[in-house]
Structures are given as C-alpha cells and as structure tokens.
Image: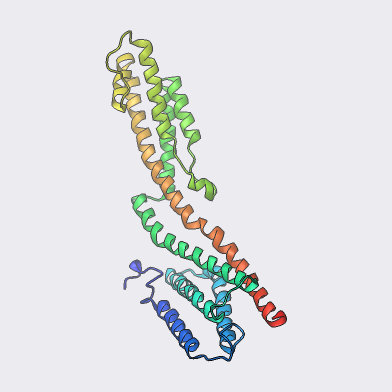
Amino acid sequence: MNARHESILNHSGARWLWIALALIVVSLLAYALHSPAVPPNGGTWLGYTLGTIAGLLILWLMYFGVRKRSYSGTSNLRGWLSAHVYLGTALILLALLHAGFQVGWNLHTFFLVLMLLVIVSGFFGVYCYLRYPTLMTRNRESATRSAMLEEIAELDQTALTLADGIDPKVHDIVLRSIQNTRLGGGVLAQLRAHDDSDAALAGIRAALEAREKSQQAAGGAKSGQTIFAMVDFLASGTNDRQAEALRKLIDLLSRKKTLASRVARDIQYQALMEIWLYFHVPLSFATVAALFAHVIAVFFYW
C-alpha cells in the first residue's frame, strides 16, 4: 500500500491490530480455561499474569511520549502510533480479565477508571488525527498558514493606505478591524480565532449610510444595501479617485475576510488536534501513579 494513503490504523497491513487481537484471544482463552478454587480475581495466578502484562503495557505506552521525539521518519512514527492505539485499546479487556470483572469502591477501581479515561481521551485523539489533517489540507488550498498570514498583513497595510485617501472615519474603521482581528495565541485563543473584516464592511456601510442621510433631502431607495450600492453612492458625492479607492478597499477587505476565515479554521483545527492532549497526558501520568499505588496495595496491604 502506498505510504501516502496509509493511516495509523492500517499501517503495515494493520499489523498491530492483529497483534492486539491475538493478545485478546489468548487472554480470553486462558480466562475461559482457568478454573480457580475461588471466583476469578486479580489474586489468582492468571490474575497476576494478566495484571503484569497490563502494567508493563501501560509503562511501554507511556514511553511513547518520550520515544516519538526521537523518530525522524514518518513511517516509524506511524507504526508506533498504530501500536499505541491498538495495544492501548486491548488494555480495556486485559484489565477487566485481570480483575475477574470484579469492581468496587476502592483504590483498584480508581486506577481502572483513570486508565479508561486515558483510553477514551486517546480515542478522541485518534479521531482528531484522522479527521482534521484532511480538513486542514482542503481548507488551505495548497497555501501554507505562514503564506496566508503574510498576505493578510500585506492586505491590512494596503487597506490602511487606501482608507487614508477616502475618509478619516473609514480609516478608523479599517484600523479598528485590524486591531480586533485575533489569530493565533494559546489553545483557547486559537479556538476563538476570528477576523473582524465583517465589522469593517458593516462600519463602512454605516458611515456611508450616515453620509447619505446628511446629503439626501428626500427618500427614495436607500443606498448602501450592498457593497456595490455603497460604491455607487460614494461615487455620487466624491471624486473618481476616492470612488476607485473605495472599490479597491472593499475588494481587499473581502479578500482578507476569505483568507482570515481560512486561517482561523486552520488554527482551530490545529487547536482541536492538540487540546485533547491537555487531558490525555496528565491523566496518563496520574494512571501510572495509580498503577504503582495499586501494585503496592496488592503486595503489601492486600
């Protein structure tokens, strides 16, 4: 299969899926054939065996956060991610078989709940990494984010220059729009990323409508209902240079709005791909701490 079309779920022919399924099948067979004198629980030889495997898997999966930084090849990283996903999912059944499906209000169940929360947050992470990169590529339309931001900055400077030659109110509106545009920042700021070009266009429309009311003595159809109507109205009360500048300004603001919307979506997709880690990583460390507490409690206080 071409590597470009290979995801973390089907990496190398879904090798890690088959490994995880084999581990699950062997564990289920051992559990079905196991006949302890007491109800199945973590204190039997099978319980200790499955618990040891699950504990080692948790530590191995935690190592991924360190190991992934040393991978330079996309294929190696994709393979490690595939193992992380499938073996992490297999942990759910291994943990339940280890406990003999016995849960209660104790430290051991707390550890199980933490582990399940880590796995569920990981499922959301898989969803993000499968969905959002495709949306980001489609949204960028072959342009990089830095290139779009550079073009937005150029459009802002050109818009201010044009607004200078039209009207002080229009200049203030454009400047305020630039200052109120929020792109980038922290994760929460990225999720709220927005562009203020709509406000600029609305402000220009309001300024022109106010000017229309002061210049027209009687009713008739209102100017300013659309961008083109605003241009026509300004052309009737100003010179050709100002009218042409306004046309260009509106074109620039419309272009900026399109670009900024794409950048905002790109930033929001990126934030959604990262925000789950703010839950997954701390919960993972908490799970490791609970794992050691679980082991100590079993061997020294059980």
Say which of 203 and 26 sits in front: 26
Where is 61 relative to 180, above or below? below
Residue at x 45%, y 25% (from the top left corner): 171
Say which of 186 and 131 sits in front: 131
In the picture as drawn, the residue positioned furthest to the top comes out as: 217
Which quadrant: the C terminus? bottom right
* x then y, percent, for residue 248: 34, 29
In this view of the protein, can residue 166 be seen by the observer? Answer: no
Say which of 252 and 36 sits in front: 36
Left/right placement of residue 280 relative to residue 202 reads right
Residue at x 50%, y 34% (from the top left corner): 179
Which quadrant: the N terminus? bottom left
* x then y, percent, for residue 101: 53, 78
State the scheme by which the image is colored: rainbow
Where is 266 relative to 84, above or below? above
In the picture as drawn, the residue positioned furthest to the right comes out as: 300
Q: In the rendered image, which quarter is residue 132 located in? A: bottom left
